[in-house]
Amino acid sequence: MLEYRVPQRQTKPLNFNQLKTYSVKSRPSKVRIEELAKPLAPGASFQEFLDSLPQILAAQELRVLIDAIVAAHKQKRPIIAMLGAHVVKCGLTPLLNDLIRRKVITAIAMNGAGIIHDFELAFIGQTSEDVGTGLEDGSFGMARETAEYLNGAAKEGARRGRGLGESVGRMIAQSKWPYRNLSLLATAYKNDCAATIHVAIGTDIIHQHPACDGAALGKTSLIDFRKFTQAVANLEGGVALNLGSAVILPEVFLKAVSVARNLGAPVKNFTAANLDMLRHYRPITNVLTRPLSLGGRAIQITGHHELLVPLIHAGVIEKLKR
């Protein structure tokens, strides 16, 4: 049988001689020499460090965020920090506590894991167990004191008609535990800063214990959702920070915005920022995009909390000194 072959056609190179060109001097450009980074002199101040950063992309967004926080503080507008538990585990509570004491942060919100790490740091000065090792023999999440104290605080809060954040903060603040001053919730409790906890049943180790009372967790967490919504209702001109919560707090924030607007609060013209080491759908959509459709500024900075939060803290403190 004869083999049929398709004839090969040669493609001629396109002639570029008639291309239309223009002078680079006439073209709009995105980067200018005045925006480039500058070498930092030894002994420079932190403000000089900030000024030395390039005025481009995330470095410029960092400046904008710092300025927004300072402006909101000076105008006595809310600054809400929504915190994933990883922020606590990264050793950042002393910086956040400082901003709470200075009345810069006016409200904090955490998921259920947040109270676990906050409590354990206050109680014994350490937290974050080895999940893999504990899971192998069923000891993961079985710390007795963590479950008993936190479930007890939830029950006491439900009995008193108080939110979970306030109840845990009150318990730690009134304790004699050696590291209680490190607690975000205790600091918030003592400084009239709203602290709310938003629980998803089954996500936290204290739910594994017989002391857990679902009715108490549900009641105190619902109270906190309503308190959080009150903070969001006053957000105009303020700042909403999402630090490391990929799912729960972006969802809670979106519902709080809807409820607040339904009840007549404008909730627009504020700055929303999402900071995390990865970009996730819900923070971008539920914190930056949908709530700002009526106006405001969205800031997205991707990076590690243990670097970004100290930079923001130092930048804010530097500007407040002026």
Image (spheres, helix red, strand yellow):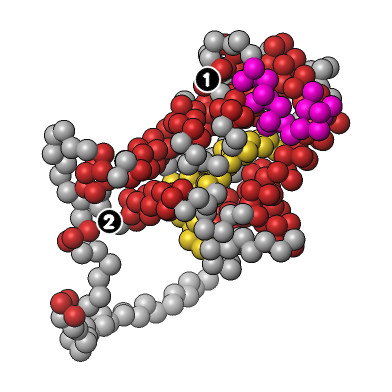
> Which amino acid lies under the numbered mark 1 shown in the image of this protein?
Asn
Depth check, front residue: 285 or 267: 267
- Find residue 151 and report its horizontal and vertical position in percent: 76, 21
Please tell me whether mark 1 sits on a helix, a strand or a loop. helix
Kindly identify the residue that appears in the image at 71 percent across and 27 percent down.
Answer: 167
Instruction: Say left or right for 274 vs 118.
Output: left
Identify the amino acid type marked 2: Gln
Residue at label 1? 181
Q: Secondary structure at mark 2?
A: loop
Give the residue number, with chain letter if any, for mark 2. 55
Q: Main secondary structure of the magenta part?
A: helix
Residue 15 percent coordinates (x, y): 22, 85
* Residues at discs 2 and 1 in contact (Cβ within 8 Å): no
Vertically, is 238 above or below 49?
Answer: below
**Along the viewing direction, whichever of 210 and 195 lies nearer the viewer:** 195
Residue 271 is situated, as x and y percent measured from the top left of the image, at 50, 56
Tell me which residue sits at (76%, 32%) in the image. Answer: 162
Res. 306 visible in picture: yes
- Residue 157 on the magenta span: yes
Q: Residues within 10 Å of mark 2 (few under 14, many from 20)?
A: many
In this picture, is 286 found above or below 81? below
Q: Earlier in the sequence, mark 2 or mark 1?
A: 2
The quadrant in which the C terminus is found is: top left
Say if the magenta span includes residue 245.
Answer: no
| Alpha carbon separation for disc pair 2 and 1 | 38 Å
Relative to 85, residue 244 above or below: below
Q: Residues within 10 Å of mark 1 (few under 14, many from 20)?
A: some
In the rendered image, residue 283, in percent from the top left (x then y), is placed at: 58, 50
Q: Residue at x 52, y 26 (%)?
A: 89
The quadrant where residue 21 appears: bottom left
Q: Nearer the viewer, residue 254 or 271?
A: 271
Mark 2 vs mark 1: give the one in front. Answer: 1
